[in-house]
Image (spheres, grey):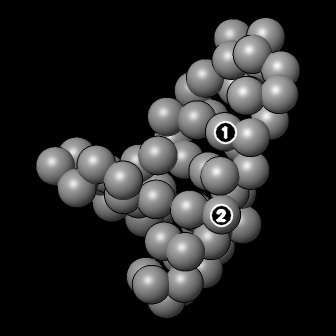
Amino acid sequence: MSARLETDPGRRREQARKALASLEAALKANPQLQREYGAALADARLDARLDEKIVSPRPRQL
């Protein structure tokens, strides 16, 4: 997702929320996509921080 490339946290969250909305719409239109894109949906939810209790780990610096 391009949201992960954004450096501004507010814009990153907003882009992640837009990506999440698009992914959820696609899954609603075709529920069979859940099997293949379920993990991406979970990542998108973490990126969008819809569940503030879950804190995604910081990316590792190589």
In the rendered view, would you say 35 is above or below 51? above
Mark 2 is surrounded, within 10 Å at the Cα level, by few (under 14), some (14 to 19) or many (20 or more) other residues, namely some
Query: Label 1: which residue?
Result: 24
The residue type indicated by label 2 comes to Lys
Q: Position of residue 3 (x, y in %)?
A: 63, 68
Q: In the image, what residue occupies the spot 74% across and 50% down?
A: 22
State which quarter of the image contains the N terminus.
bottom right
Q: Is residue 23 left or right of residue 26?
A: left
Q: CA distance from mark 2 to mark 1?
A: 10 Å
- Left or right placement of residue 27 versus residue 15 in this view: right
- Crowd band around label 1 with a 10 angstrom C-alpha radius: few (<14), some (14–19), many (20+): some
Task: Residue at 41% x, 48% y: name it.
Answer: 46
Provide the secondary structure element on which disc 2 rests: helix
Circle 2 is placed at which residue position? 18
Left or right: residue 31 versus residue 30 is: left
Q: Quadrant of residue 33?
A: top right
Q: Quadrant of residue 36?
A: top right
Name the element at disc 1: helix
Find residue 25 and report its horizontal and vertical position in percent.
74, 40
